[in-house]
Image (cartoon, rainbow, N blue to C red):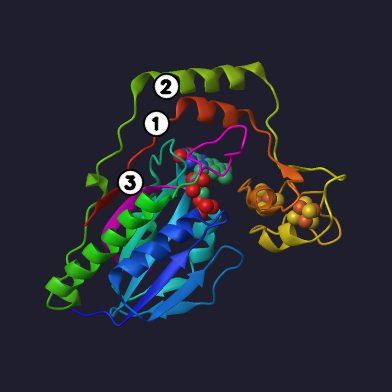
């Protein structure tokens, strides 16, 4: 079957999930591309047909799909629309996220024909504690483009939408994880939790550095920063995505979580991207 249009559906506060989605789309070679970017808003209700390919890329938060991504996707309806689903994680683990995304998009009417787990720079990565810094890099993006080409080939070998077979994403190969660093991480997390040290709930802003340019207000997916009050953050709204931290030209915003040092220490070995189709 031939698809004439691709819909790139993404939620991507720090732009790694979106970059991977764009590379997959490029790889398919389909020229007619529409984008449903849910990062800053809930998209309008929309029904997608079976002659369209959906490429859905979202980040992993705490081993799950970022909850705001699912919330924003819930009004999309699909009519057996073939879908490529991808979760992007910060080199620690994606745990249940891919299976969760598969179940969710299945309930909206998508037919999952391919899946992927890709690594992106961790939202908590900083100059002091780099975690998968710079990913997706050139190799990751080439791998994503190649995945897109394979998806196209799969579509072309099916006579029609009915003969396009779905995929069991549970069978995707997990990336290699060295045992001792993982043990060290788990042990340190238990110690940290027992210590009762309060975890920061939001990034902090330095009044002396902030120029009130308003970029963080524009880039916050959760509406947690108000215009004119850029040095404050509404804790109940903040999802700790770090878009405001990474996007601040003055480096006025920081998120000083003790997890950053732990993740930096324990997950240094770059994990491989995996696909199934
Ligand atoms: C609140 C939060 C929780 C996260 N949890 C995980 C996790 O469980 N495992 C992991 O490897 N990365 C985790 N990350 C890192 C992101 O999955 C990763 O940086 C991803 O590339 C961000 O996607 P984006 O650039 O599209 O926003 C987490 C990030 C945030 C903000
Ligand atoms: S992006 Fe940085 S400098 Fe600009 S308003 Fe926000 S905190 Fe201030
Ligand atoms: S205030 Fe919170 S939700 Fe908004 S961009 Fe910053 S970390 Fe993300």
Residue 255 on image: x %, y %: 68, 39
Q: Secondary structure at mark 1?
A: loop
Left or right: where 80 falls relative to 104: left
Q: Earlier in the sequence, mark 3 or mark 2?
A: 2
Residue occupying the point 77% across, 49% down: 233
Q: Does 123 lie within the magenta span?
A: yes
Query: Any mark on residue 181, and which?
Result: 2
Q: Which residue is mark 1?
A: 269
Q: Separation of disc 1 and disc 3 at Cα?
A: 13 Å
Q: For the N terminus, which image quadrant?
A: bottom left
Identify residue for label 3: 273
Cβ atoms at labels 3 and 2 below 8 Å apart: no
Question: Badge 2: how crowded within 10 Å, few (<14), some, or many (20+)?
Answer: some
* Residue 126 screen position, x and y as percent: 61, 38
Does ligand 1 reach within 8 Å of label 1's beta carbon? no
Q: Are marks 2 and 1 in contact (CB under 8 Å)?
A: yes
- Nearest the camera: 174 or 239? 174
Is residue 216 among the parts visible in the rendering? Answer: yes
Q: Earlier in the sequence, mark 2 or mark 1?
A: 2
Element under label 3? loop
Q: Residue at the location (33% across, 46% down)?
A: 273
Expressed as whole percent of the image width and height from the top left, the position of residue 113 reads 24, 63
Q: Is residue 233 above or below residue 160?
A: above
Q: Please tell me whether mark 2 or mark 1 is closer to you in this view.
A: 1
* 229 shown above or below 46: above
Position of 28 compared to 159: left or right? right
Q: Which residues are magenta?
A: 106-133
């Amino acid at each position: 079957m031939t698809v004439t249009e691709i819909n790139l559906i993404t939620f991507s506060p720090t732009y790694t999930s979106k970059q991977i989605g764009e590379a997959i789309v490029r790889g398919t070679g389909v020229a007619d591309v529409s984008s449903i970017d849910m990062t800053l808003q809930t998209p309008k209700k929309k029904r997608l047909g079976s002659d369209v390919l959906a490429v859905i890329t979202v980040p992993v938060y705490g081993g799950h799909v970022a909850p705001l991504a699912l919330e924003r996707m819930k009004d999309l309806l699909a009519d057996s629309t073939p879908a490529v689903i991808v979760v992007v994680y910060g080199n620690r683990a994606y745990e249940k996220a891919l299976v969760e995304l598969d179940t969710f998009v299945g309930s909206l009417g998508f037919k999952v024909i391919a899946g992927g787990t890709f690594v992106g720079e961790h939202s908590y990565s900083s100059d002091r504690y780099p975690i998968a810094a710079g990913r997706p890099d050139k190799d990751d993006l080439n791998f994503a483009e190649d995945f897109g080409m394979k998806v196209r080939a799969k579509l072309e070998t099916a006579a029609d939408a009915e003969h396009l077979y779905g995929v069991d994403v549970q069978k995707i190969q997990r990336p290699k994880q060295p045992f001792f660093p993982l043990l060290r991480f788990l042990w340190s997390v238990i110690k940290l939790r027992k210590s009762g040290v309060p975890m920061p709930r939001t990034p902090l802003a330095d009044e002396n550095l902030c120029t009130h340019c308003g970029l963080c207000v524009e880039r916050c997916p959760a509406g947690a920063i108000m215009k004119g009050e850029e040095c404050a953050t509404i804790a109940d709204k903040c999802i700790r995505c770090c878009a405001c931290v990474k996007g601040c030209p003055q480096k006025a915003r920081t998120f000083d979580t003790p997890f950053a040092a732990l993740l930096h220490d324990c997950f240094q070995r770059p994990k491989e991207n995996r696909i199934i189709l």
